[in-house]
Amino acid sequence: MLRGNQALIDRDLAVLWHPCTQMKDHEALPPVPIRRGQGVWLEDFEGKRYLDAISSWWVNLFGHANPYINAALRAQAEELEHVILAGFAHEPAVRLAERLVSLAPPGLSRCFYADNGSSAVEVALKMSYHHWRNLGRTRKTRFITLENSYHGETLGALAVGNVPLYKETYAPLLMDVISVPSPDCYHRAPGESWDAHALRRFADMESALASHAEEACAVIVEPLVQCAGGMRMYPPVYLQRLREACDRHGVHLIADEIAVGFGRTGTLFAFEQAGITPDFLCLSKGLTGGYLPLSAVLTRESIYQAFYDDYASQKAFLHSHSYTGNALACAVALATLDLFERDDVIARNRDKSKTMSEAAAVFADHPHVAEVRQTGMILAIELVKDKASREPYPWQERRGLSVYRHGLDRGVLLRPLGNVIYFMPPYVISDEEIRFMADVAYEGVCRATED
Ligand SMILES: *Cc1c(COP(=O)(O)O)cnc(C)c1O
């Protein structure tokens, strides 16, 4: 019998269908079998280690097998693993809702749980629509979204997202949305500031709101960084304008902080940098420190009150998922929030993001790098065929994939988004590990762009 990596690979390929994968690619590059994790490191069955530079798809905050979170998980498992949350309550769900409400800006006073990011987006969309319906505003049935945005893979979430790679195939199945050009600052004019560009782009949003206010339930955005859309970034001023315009036109603002929440952009929540409060806040990914699927939608008391009535009024929000408010997941989320407080993580990350910026400075002069951009703990490098014109590499060449392969050879898990290489590491990464991650990525970029 084969041992080590190959044994697991063979069994895997016989039965598994991997997410977001052309399975035929595994003929050339099999999945990497992981035996255990420790801190920022993953280890395969033959002792080879990989630095997890992308936090295992943006979920991990405090490292793999974190002793503090492990202990919380163990303790909770001894007490209560799960109970139906309709008609029942438990301590971790209540405690977590209390803490999320206290961390969110005043106004967001109600917490609704779901069990993954996409379903949190579905909840926010349905709640927004249903809120207006309960008020008799039955013409409000549509959503406004930004180009290049990503909100998940279920049909509602996919419909309000706007990355063609994921969306186009399923277009005939999706509800029709109002799509507005993104403030994405990669596309700013030469010499133009981020703010000037974002403000110029806001004119499109303003006119969409003006023409569709009667039929629009909400605008949904990823505050500051459009992550799956290639880590494209824009400044807080856009969110300030958006908040003001949504209020003026009577349209909700949904902040999808599933990826950017929990410190990724340098503040606990990204929208804080704009000094605004959304009407719905979607949280997942880092919420449980990368341990278990859980999501939460926070909303305003006034929205909650629009559903609160006698049963016969038929205004209730009859939405649920089997694992809503799972006790184990809530317990690890509470432990994750403990670590933020105990270690003053937001402040410490300021130094780490500076180290990231220094370690990645070398990319700026590379002949095939159009831009190095950073917001907090997210740093992205845009590879192009031609630096001056920013002509992209044809996607068929899969340059990012060769950076990925080089990373694996050298022991760094990078998973470029097309031709965008990025770092979004767990916060427990050391300065030395940051430099290693950047060095390996730089070698990978040099090789991938040789010809
Ligand atoms: C990942 C992501 C989602 C979807 O979350 P899943 O848990 O993968 O369903 C939604 N919105 C944003 C911004 C995301 O990055």
Image: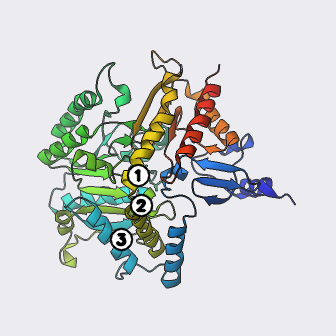
Furthest residue toward left = 248
Q: Kindly identify which residue carries mark 1.
A: 348
Q: Nearer the viewer, residue 61 or 418?
A: 61
Q: Kindly identify which residue carries mark 3.
A: 96
Residue 74: give its label: none
- Name the N-terminal-most of marks 1 and 2: 2
In space, the residues marked 2 and 3 are separated at their CA atoms by 19 Å
Q: Where residue 224 sits in the image (x, y, percent)? A: 33, 42
Q: Kindly identify which residue carries mark 2.
A: 343
Q: What's the residue at 16%, 64% (across, down)?
A: 302
Taking the image as shown, residue 1 lies to the left or right of residue 98, namely right
Q: What's the residue at 66%, 46% (across, down)?
A: 23
- Name the N-terminal-most of marks 1 and 3: 3
**Up-down: is 411 above or below 299?**
above
Taking the image as shown, residue 268 lies to the left or right of residue 339, namely left
Q: Where residue 435 sits in the image (x, y, percent)? A: 56, 39
Q: Where residue 254 sits in the image (x, y, percent)? A: 28, 52
